[in-house]
Image (cartoon, rainbow, N blue to C red):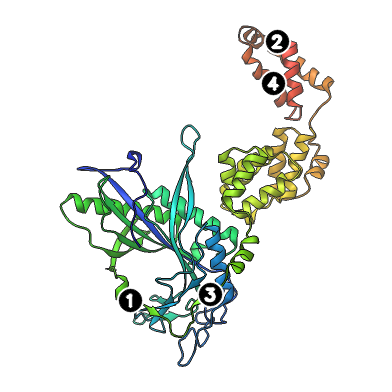
Amino acid sequence: MTLVDVRTPDPKRFIPGATGDWEVIIGMEVHAQVTSNSKLFSGAANEFGNAPNANVSLVDAAMPGMLPVINEECVRQAIRTGLGLKAQINNRSIFDRKNYFYPDLPQGYQISQYKDPIVGEGQIVISLGPDRQGNFEDIEIGIERLHLEQDAGKSMHDQHPTMSHVDLNRSGVALMEIVSKPDMRSSDEAKAYMTKLRSIVRYLGTCDGNMDEGSMRADVNVSVRRPGEGFGTRCEIKNVNSIRFIGQAIEYEARRQIGILEDGGSIDQETRLFDPNKGETRSMRSKEDAHDYRYFPDPDLLPLEFDDAYVEELKQHLPELPDDKKARFVAELGLSVYDASVLVSEKAIADYFEAVASGRDGKAAANWVINDLLGALNKAGKGIEETPVSPFQLGGIIDLIKDETISGKIAKDLFEIVWNEGGVPGEIVESRGMKQVTDTGAIEKAVDDIIAANPDQVEKVKAKPTLAGWFVGQVMKATGGKANPQAVQALVKAKLGIEE
């Protein structure tokens, strides 16, 4: 691809070196395993976690005479992903043979797409922030292409003291290689890009995005330059399978290259690996160019062709994507950009929130989902799929607050009970006597008792009315948090002669 610099150098992203400032340039090639029931060119299953070599057909093992047959579902998934990336869909694309030898590549070549991919240029908008003023910075990252290819197998070197084993379960699995333009200028941008891309494919259902299982992994291209100069020599960090590791690998690699250049050396274009235990990259091999792979069109596969109507039919059935959902949450539910961003970050979280917010105040639902539910899940090390509190239960708690059956403080206690024990919120409140006290006579008596017992504090309030909150707290404490907070506040102000 032709490298085009679309970013204006930004001093806040510069990396200070011993001899001046530097700028890091980042592009990524993300391999996303296509969600389908079988592989790209064979009918073999592709479930993760099966016994070694259990998901292998004669095609995957490259037995003589076996011919590939395209899996149409994988084609549909690639087109849907391209549409989600606002990319150009190419109605005609060609599968090529990428020739290289490796023990886990039975054919001696990989069927991929080179000059004519199924998806052309697109874009992803990432958001960095919020900053100290609560603002977000939106940055457009260009997509160069998306092409379909088959995965290789996996070499295992820890199964035998003197031999390596090969597992071909992954051989032939459909991958989408999504290639960005070199538009990122910091590790934070790269992490935000990967997070957003994973979110998009999960919303679309085209890849599960499980990086720990290898179904989504990134090759990260890193180079450095003096601000305003041309692109430097890049190094590719291969197969990074964690967003956190992507950030660490970029930070280390940028510093490594800066150190070499400042010492008067030059950067060798090469492929490197990231060691998460040491937090550093190390050389793997010199970087190959396209001509090293001797690409040529695969003679066993015809060009892949479809018409605009085929694409339009897929477009009509796309789900609402994160950016559109975020805009709707802000416009229709009155959420802040920050809250909406948190809620749409994962499809499962957005679905949970919408179930809670249905028929209720959106801001209240957002506060409970973000602060209480996600906070508790994070503390427990659980994902949203593992939540012990259902949308029905959380919605029930919010309803009890709205109709003043319970106070906000009681609601926090109720949430803990539901989290730990389960149950229907309304029934728990009834059976455990958790209803808030709304009887003004009982509240008034509690207020009178607190005022009578604290004459010194009364004098302080006369001098400084803002101290009236102390009395409100004492009354709430005396009533076990069951008194209606608004009623308590009104009575305290009336008794102490504080004007509204």
Residue at left offset 70%, top offset 10%: 499
Q: Give the spatial CA distance, label 1 vs label 2.
A: 82 Å
Camera sees residue 298? yes
Residue where numbered disc 2 is placed: 499
Q: Is label 1 or label 3 in front?
A: 3
Residue drawn 50% across the image and 67% down it: 90
Say what amino acid the circle numbered 4 marks: Val
Say above or below: 464 vs 77: above
* Residue behind mark 3: 305
Query: Crowding near pointer 4: few (<14 within 10 Å), some, many (20+)?
Result: many
In the rendered view, does 482 fall on the left or right side of 211?
right
Numbered disc in front, either 1 or 2: 1
Rendered residue at 26%/63% (across/down): 269
SS at mark 2? loop
Counting residues from the start of the chain, the first of labels 2 and 4 encountered is: 4
For the residues marked 2 and 4, what is the alpha-carbon distance in whole angstroms?
16 Å
Dot 1 corresponds to which residue?
293
In this view, 29 is above or below 130: below
Per the image, the residue denoted by label 4 is 472
Toward the bottom, the furthest residue is 65
